[in-house]
């Protein structure tokens, strides 16, 4: 994926892309750099790399950024999976009974109704009991 994005912006196929194309190249990979990040990267590339980046430098630059994005995406995916597992009846909500079952499965023991209610109060932002 990195190589494909790099090649797309290496229009003259000389193995380099211009600092001017870095932002667009990053965006094709799904990374949305802030304006400040782009300024910092551009200055770094202009000062230290002659205004151009080869593929190896591009990978070093993008690797950590993509790992952060991927870690966030994995976390969201895992939360959605956990929610679906907790939502036994599939109604899109986790009831106190479903929460009690989920906690028992996770902890391997039953909690008292009051303990489950306290947990629900902490996570039930709109106060509807689900």
Image (cartoon, grey):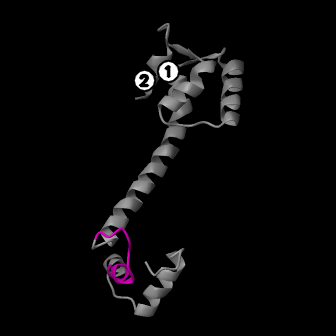
Quadrant holding the N terminus: top left
Judge from the rendering whether residue 24 lies leftward or rightward of residue 79; answer left or right: right
Q: Which residue is mark 1?
A: 55
Asked whether disc 1 touches disc 2, contact meaning CB atoms under 8 Å apart, the reply is: yes
Q: How many marks?
A: 2
Q: For mark 2, does the 10 Å Cα neighbourhood hold few (<14), some (14 to 19), or many (20 or more) residues? A: few
Judge from the rendering whether residue 129 lies leftward or rightward of residue 45; answer left or right: left
> Quick check: is 97 in the magenta stretch?
yes
Relative vertical location of residue 36 with respect to residue 101 in this rendering, above or below: above
Q: Which residues are magenta?
A: 90-101
Quadrant holding the C terminus: bottom left
User: Image quarter for residue 70?
Assistant: top left
As drawn, the label of residue 108 is none
Q: Residue at x 37, y 66 (%)?
A: 83
User: Image quarter for residue 46?
Assistant: top right
In percent of width and height, residue 120 lies at 47, 81
Q: Residue at x 65, y 16 (%)?
A: 51
Relative vertical location of residue 69 with respect to residue 116 in this rendering, above or below: above
Q: Residue at x 50, y 14 (%)?
A: 10
> Quick check: is 41 in the magenta stretch?
no
Most extreme residue toward the left is 89
User: Image quarter for residue 41?
Assistant: top right
Q: Which residue is mark 2?
A: 3
Callout 1: SS:
helix
In percent of width and height, residue 81 lies at 34, 61
């Amino acid at each position: 994926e990195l190589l494909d994005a790099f090649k797309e912006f290496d229009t003259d196929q000389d193995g380099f892309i211009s600092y001017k194309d870095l932002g667009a190249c990053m965006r094709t990979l799904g990374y949305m750099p802030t304006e400040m990040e782009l300024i910092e990267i551009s200055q770094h590339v202009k000062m230290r790399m002659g205004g151009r980046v080869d593929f190896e430098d591009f990978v070093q630059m993008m690797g950590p950024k993509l790992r952060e994005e991927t870690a966030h995406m994995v976390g969201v995916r895992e939360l959605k999976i956990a929610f679906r597992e907790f939502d036994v009846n599939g109604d899109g909500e986790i009831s106190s009974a479903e929460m009690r079952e989920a906690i028992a499965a996770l902890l391997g023991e039953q909690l008292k109704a009051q303990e489950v209610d306290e947990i629900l109060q902490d996570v039930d932002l709109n106060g509807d009991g689900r």
